[in-house]
Amino acid sequence: MQYRHYKGGLYELVCMATLEADLSDMVVYRAADGSIWTRPKQAFFQLVEVDGELVPRFAPVD
């Protein structure tokens, strides 16, 4: 599934993973340039403030 970052980039959610150190949930995602990134699940799906408005950090793209 594709997501758009609030700053504009498109990313593909690759899979969910578990961080070995503390068993926290992680999101593994790929940028348009092919680079692979991870972010805690809570941070990936959290709302961020942009110009005084709360928006998803990553919003699903239809």
Image (spheres, helix red, strand yellow):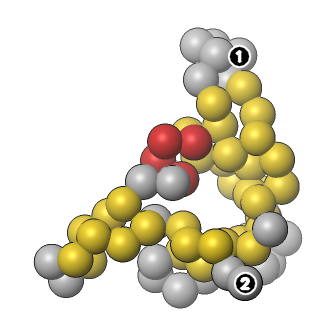
Q: Nearer the viewer, residue 22 or 47?
A: 47
Q: Residue at x 36, y 60 (%)?
A: 47
Residue 28, horizontal then vertical, whole percent: 74, 49
Residue 38, horizontal then vertical, whole percent: 66, 47
Query: Which image quarter is the C terminus in?
Result: bottom right
Q: Secondary structure at mark 1?
A: loop
Separation (CA) of disc 2 from disc 1: 32 Å
Q: Residue at x 28, y 70 (%)?
A: 54
Amino acid type, residue under disc 1 in the picture: Glu
Quadrant in which residue 22 is drawn = top right
Q: Residue furthest front?
A: 62
Image position of 60 (left or right of 34):
left
Q: Circle 1 sits on which residue? A: 20
Q: Secondary structure at mark 2?
A: loop
- Residue 45 drawn above or below residue 11: above
Amino acid type, residue under disc 2 in the picture: Asp
Dot placed on the residue nearer the N-terminal end, 2 or 1 = 1
Query: Which image quarter is the N terminus in?
Result: bottom right
- Residue 57 drawn above or below residue 41: below
Q: Residue at x 69, y 54 (%)?
A: 37
Q: Residue at x 36, y 72 (%)?
A: 55
Residue 36, horizontal then vertical, whole percent: 77, 57
Q: Residues within 10 Å of mark 2 (few under 14, many from 20)?
A: few
Q: Which disc is residue 4 wearing?
A: none
Q: Circle 2 sits on which residue? A: 62
